[in-house]
Image (cartoon, coloured by chain):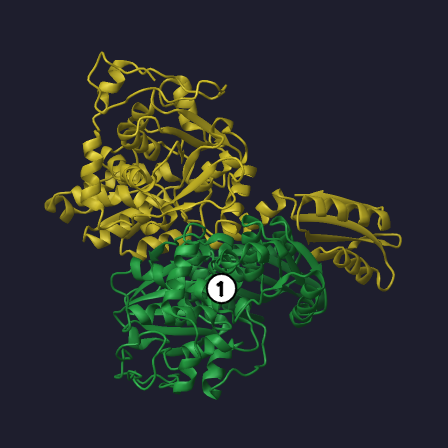
Chain colours: A yellow, B green
Amino acid sequence: MAQVNEIEPTWNILGDSFPKQYEVPEEVEKKPKAENISKIKLKLQDIQDAHNRIKSDVVFTPVIEAKYVGKNFCNVFLKCENLQNTGSFKARGACNILSSMSPSDKSKGCTVSGGRNYLSAMTYYGFKQSVPINVIVPKDCPLVDKHTYKENFAIVKVHGNDLNDASLHALTYCDEIGSNYVHGSDRLDLIAGYGTLGLELLTQMDKMDAILCPVGSGGLVASLVLAVKSLKPNCLIYGVECSAAPTMTKALQEKKPVMIQLNPTIADSLSTIIASNNAFNIVRGYLDRMITVDEVWISRAMINILEREKMVVEGAAACPVAAVMAGKVPELRGKNIVCVLSGGNINSSRMSRVIDRGMAAEGRLVKFSVALPDVPGAMAKLLAKVTDNGADVKSFVPERAWMRRDIFTVNMLIETSDIHHAKDLEKKLLKDYPHSHFIML
Amino acid sequence: MAQVNEIEPTWNILGDSFPKQYEVPEEVEKKPKAENISKIKLKLQDIQDAHNRIKSDVVFTPVIEAKYVGKNFCNVFLKCENLQNTGSFKARGACNILSSMSPSDKSKGCTVSGGRNYLSAMTYYGFKQSVPINVIVPKDCPLVDKHTYKENFAIVKVHGNDLNDASLHALTYCDEIGSNYVHGSDRLDLIAGYGTLGLELLTQMDKMDAILCPVGSGGLVASLVLAVKSLKPNCLIYGVECSAAPTMTKALQEKKPVMIQLNPTIADSLSTIIASNNAFNIVRGYLDRMITVDEVWISRAMINILEREKMVVEGAAACPVAAVMAGKVPELRGKNIVCVLSGGNINSSRMSRVIDRGMAAEGRLVKFSVALPDVPGAMAKLLAKVTDNGADVKSFVPERAWMRRDIFTVNMLIETSDIHHAKDLEKKLLKDYPHSHFIML
C-alpha cells in the first residue's frame, strides 16, 4: 500500500504488507481517494482514550493458541471475546458510549434498538452506570432476549414487525420521552470502543502476521484497521463475511455502501442489509482482503471450536475459523494469525441443532432408511447389525402405515465416527438390505 | 490446623485458616498422625522442578472471572484447564512423567490403561516426545476415544470387558514387550505435574481465599494442597465429589482408602472405586472440606457454564461450580474463590443430552401429554395455543394407536423461558384440556 502523501492522514499507514506472490481473488480496491480519508474523524488517540476510559469495566480477554484449527498449516490464535462481559465485543463499544456521556445526558437515559449483542451490552452497562435504558424490539424478538434485557432492568417496549419498524419507532419515541437515541452502528465512539480489542492484541501477541475478523456492518474490522495498522502497519487485516450477507464485499465492489438482499444464516448477528458508512470509509483502501464463507463451513467451524477448542461461539464468531478451515487463506501458510471469536451468544436449543448439523456435515450423523420384512425379530436384527459395526443408533422410527406387501420402512439416525466409517457401514447394510436409501446429511 | 512440630514435615504448613464460626457438616479429620506425614515423599521443590520441566509444553491456562456463577454471593474465578492441551489437567502429569524419563526408558516406550483424559494426554505427549505408547482399552471403549489415541499414533489394543481387565492385562503385556507400565494415578511424578496448576494460580490470583477442586482418585486436589498450602497457607482448599462416587469422603471417614460402590454419573471421569493412596496421605489433615454434589446440580452447572460463561466442560469439571450453585459453601460469602474447570472432554452427542437435561432441570424444557378430541383442526388449535403463550413446541407426537372413544393423546416437548413461564402455561392449557398430564423434567 503506497504511502498517501498528498493529504495529512488521520493515522499512520506505513508500507505495503500484502503478499504479492499470491493470486487473491477477492482483493479489494487499494488507494482510496484523498477526500475519503480526510472524512474520517476517528484517530488512534480516540481508541487509546477509550482504552483508558473502559479498561477497568471490560474483560481483558485472553488469547488462546488453537489446538486443532489450522494444524500443520499455520498457527492460529483465538481472541476470546466470547468471554467478554455480556458475551461479545459490543461490550467495549457500549461501555465507551455510556462512559463518555455527560451526567445530564446520563440522567435522561438512552433509547436503543438493534441486534441482540448490542442491546445486551447497552442494558448491562446502562444498569452498571445508572443510565436508564429503553429498548424497542419488534414482535418476533425471542423471549430469552427480552428476558436478558429485563434482567438488566431495562424497559422493554415491543413495536412493529421487524427491526426496521422498531428502529424507526425508537427515533420518534426517544423524542417523546426526552431520552438520547443511540444508534447501534456507525457511531465513532462505538468504533473507538471496539478498537480497544486491537490495542489488547498488540500487547498480547509478539508475532502477529494477520487478523481475521467477522464483518457485519463493519464496525469491528474498521476499528482494528485503525488501531492495528497505525501501530503495526505490516499486520494483515482480513474481514470475513457469511455468504448470506456480503455487505462489505458489495460495498467495496460498488465503492459505496449498498443495500443487499439477505438470506437466512446461522451467523445471524452478521445479517445486516448495508455496511456502516464510517466503517466503510475507514476500511476502504486499508483492508487487505474480504472473504466470504458458506453455511456448511460455519457449522463445521462452530462444532470444531466447541469440541476441539472447548469454547462456545455464535455463528458470526466462527466465520474467521471457517475461512481457515475452508482453505480460503493459502497465502497465510506458516504465519501467526489471530481469529477474533467475536461473541458467544447462541441459545441452547439452537446449539443442539448446530451440533447435529455440524456432525452431519462431517459425516458423523447419517440418516438411513431401510425396507424390512415384516417378520418377528427383523428390527432387532437390524439394530444388532448397526451396533456390531461400531455405530450408534440415535433414533429409530418404523413406518408401518406405509406398509406394502410384507415390507415396512424404518428410518434411522445413526452416529458414526467419521465419513469413512459411515461409508463402510453403508456398504455392509446395503448387502443385507438392498431396498434402502442412505442419506448423508 | 496446629503446626506439627514433633516431626520434620516435608512441606511447610503454617497456621489454621479454617473459618471456625461456621458449622460445616462434612469437615474432615484434622491432625494426621506423624507416621502418615513422614510417609509422603513429595516436596514443594518437586512441583517447582516439574514446572520448570514442562512449562514450555503445557498451556499456562487463563483464569476468567465468572459472570453469573456466585453472583451477589461471592467472586468466582474459573481456572480453565479445559483449554489445556488434550483438554484436561492430565496433560501436566503426563508431560512431567515423559519429560522425566531417561532416554533408554523413552526408547522402550510405555504401556498405559485408564481413563480417557489420562490416555489422551499420554498419547499426545508420547507422540510429541517420540515415546512409543501402547494403550490397552476394554471392549466397551467408545469409538471416538480409540480414534483420539490413534490420531496420536499410539498402538491401541482391546482386551477384557472393563477397565480392571484392561489394566491387569497391561501389567503383563508391558513385561512381554519390555515397555514401561505407567499407572494413571498414585504416581508422585504425576501429582508433581498436576501441582504446577497450583503454582500458576498463585501467580495469577492476588487475593485467593479458597480453591474448589474436583476429586476422583484425588491426585489433583493433593497436588494443590501441597503446592498452595506450602506457599499460601491460609488459602482454603475444598475437594468436590459427585455423590455417585464419594471415594475421598469415604476414605477420610474410614481413615484409609476403601472400595466403594459406583453409580452412573455424568461426571464420569470422577468415577473411581478407590482413592489413591499417595493422594490420601497428602490431603489427610490438610484438606479443609470435602463436598458432594448430585447429578441434577452437575447438569445445571454444566449448562450454566455453557450458556453464561461460554465454556465447554465435562461433568467432572462442573462439580465445583455445582457446589457453589447448590449453596453448599455458605462460609465463603464475599470471598474470592477459584473453581478448577478440570477438563472439557465431553462428546458432542452427550453434550446435546446435557443441554436438554440442564434445561429440563431449570424448567425450560417440559413434557406435556394432552388428550385431544379426534376432530379436524384439534392439533392445529393446540399448537396455536402453546405458541400464543410464548412457548416453543420442540416435538409433537400423536399416539393414535391408544385411541379410546373419540379422544387421542399427543405428547409434546415444549421450550419455555423459565419455570414460572412453564407453570403459567400449565394453568392455561389445563383450562382447555382437562385430561392432560404436565411432566416437568
| Residue at the extreme top | A6
Foreground: B75 or A250?
A: B75
The residue carrying pointer 1 sits among few (fewer than 14), some (14 to 19) or many (20 or more) residues within 10 Å by Cα, namely many
A129 vs B224: above or below: above
- Quarter occupied by the N terminus of chain B: bottom left
- Looking at the image, which residue is at 70% across and 68% down? B172
Question: Whole-percent x and y of residue A60?
Answer: 29, 48
Q: Which residue is mark 1?
A: B358
Q: Is residue A264 visible?
A: no
B111 vs A78: above or below: below
Q: Is residue A418 visible?
A: yes
Question: Whole-percent x and y of residue A140?
Answer: 42, 46
**Residue B272, image quadrant:** bottom right
In the displayed structure image, the side of residue A91 where residue A8 appears, left or right: left
Question: Whole-percent x and y of residue A285?
Answer: 34, 20
In the displayed structure image, the side of residue B166 where residue A218 appears, left or right: left
- Looking at the image, which residue is at 10% across and 45% down? A104
Under circle 1, the secondary element is helix
A411 vs A213: above or below: below
Foreground: A42 or A199?
A: A199
Marked residue chain, label 1 = B
Which residue type carries mark 1?
Answer: Gly
Question: Whole-percent x and y of residue A106?
Answer: 15, 47
